[in-house]
Amino acid sequence: MGKKFLMSWARHYLHRQVRQRPPLPLEHFDPRGARRVLLINSTALGDLLFSTPAIRALKETYPDWRLDLLINPAFAALMAPNPHLERLISFPGRSWRLFPLMRELKHANYDLVIILHGNDPEATLLAWAAGSPYIIGSAGSPLSFAYAARVERQDPLEHAIERRLNFIRLLGADTPDKSMQLFLAPGEEDRAGALLSRHFGGSPSLLAAFHPTGSGSYKWWPREYFAALGDYLHETYGASFLIISGRWDRPEAEALAARLRGPSLVTGGRLPLPTVAALLNRCRLLVANDSGPLHMALALKVPSIALMGADHPRRVGPYQVEWGVFLYRKEEVCGQEHCLNQRCPDNRCLQAIQVGEVIDLLRSWWEPRYFLGR
């Protein structure tokens, strides 16, 4: 079932449903009587981690609520140790696979549904199927007529963490702590330590991580820049390297590893995501493009330098944490034009970030705080 057809069907279906069972105004919702709440965040890893401050704040405000999360199954093992969540429900994807889950959700008796982030029409169809008269979602959704509350985006550059907090602020929940969270399962730290010992012949004195790829090459800092930076880190600090990649971008990661003078371990999609997180947690530095591993490192409080290009760091960069900084040159190189798409003819905005700038940041920001201080 194509997305256009599914969207058209969903619009007609939900219009009929709303006439029969209109959503109630959110003002009628009584938080004291609620027990089961469904959160929907079924897209990418970064989107999921951006939601963790809102999830934490919701649980802290309403500790008796049972919070279930509908999630991309690729990240379920990573989120399973989160103590704020009761149950993880796997998002089945598009097409007819939606309908068995819709039938299941009808019997779950949720008091409230919050769409923190999800692709439509799937997210709204599943939210409606949960049966609650109270759905909170984005006003930008073409299916927002089915919601009890529609949250407008206040600023096009509002950070993704704040956008998610705006959903729960309608319920009287909030937090001054905007840091993301990622919890490691018992045993993962030991597995990571054993893996590093086998690969490097012992625990590296300084393990630095690179994530040289991302969702599209228009987001990639040049390979030769990463290589030059790696050689500097090895020669100056004796660094060994964890190079994070999946299966599809493994050749790029291995090509980088071949150019580095220091020893390296390429994950290459061979390890479970929780083990990658545990390895990353042992690193004292990450340098990464705008990507899921960047947000993992920030959630783990690993000192991180983000190399930002197509998207604006005010929207998705390190946010209100002392252990994350960024470099960004797009507006100088490309002007104000928004270019967040995979058809970008080149990535001049990232090529404009010079290796020397990253080294300067290492000396001024990372070295005094996270190298000499440990």
Image: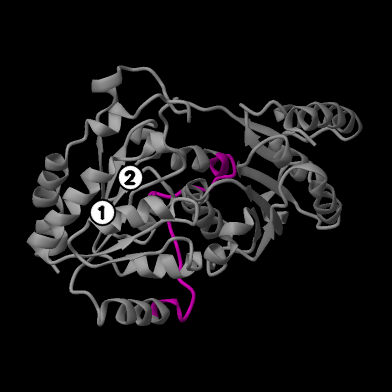
The location of residue 76, given as percent across then percent down, is 59, 62
State the colouring used for the structure image: one colour
Horizontal side, residue 87 vs residue 357: left or right: right
Q: Is residue 256 visible?
A: yes
The location of residue 290, given as percent across then percent down, is 38, 42
Horizontal side, residue 152 vs residue 157: left or right: right
The location of residue 155, given as percent across then percent down, is 44, 25
First in sequence, mark 1 or 2: give its number: 2
Q: Quadrant of residue 108?
A: bottom right
Which residue is at a point 31% across and 45% down the rendered structure image? 320
User: Which dot marks residue 281?
Assistant: none
For the residue pair 351 and 178, the one nearer the viewer reads as 351
Task: Please give the residue where the numbered disc 2 appears in the rendered image.
Answer: 318
Q: Is residue 59 magenta?
A: no
The amino acid marked with disc number 2 is Pro
Which residue is at a point 77% across and 40% down the rendered structure image? 125
The amino acid marked with disc number 1 is Trp
What element does badge 2 sit on?
loop
Which quadrant is home to the N terminus?
top right
Q: Is residue 179 magenta?
A: yes
Q: Is the Cβ of the residue at disc 1 closer than 8 Å to that at disc 2?
A: yes
Which residue is at a point 64% across and 51% down the rendered structure image? 39
CA neighbours of label 1 inside 10 A, class few (<14), some (14 to 19), many (20+): many
User: Which dot marks residue 323?
Assistant: 1
What element does badge 1 sit on?
loop
Q: Is residue 158 above or below residue 249?
A: above
Q: Which residues are magenta?
A: 167-189
For the residue pair 336 and 205, the one nearer the viewer reads as 205
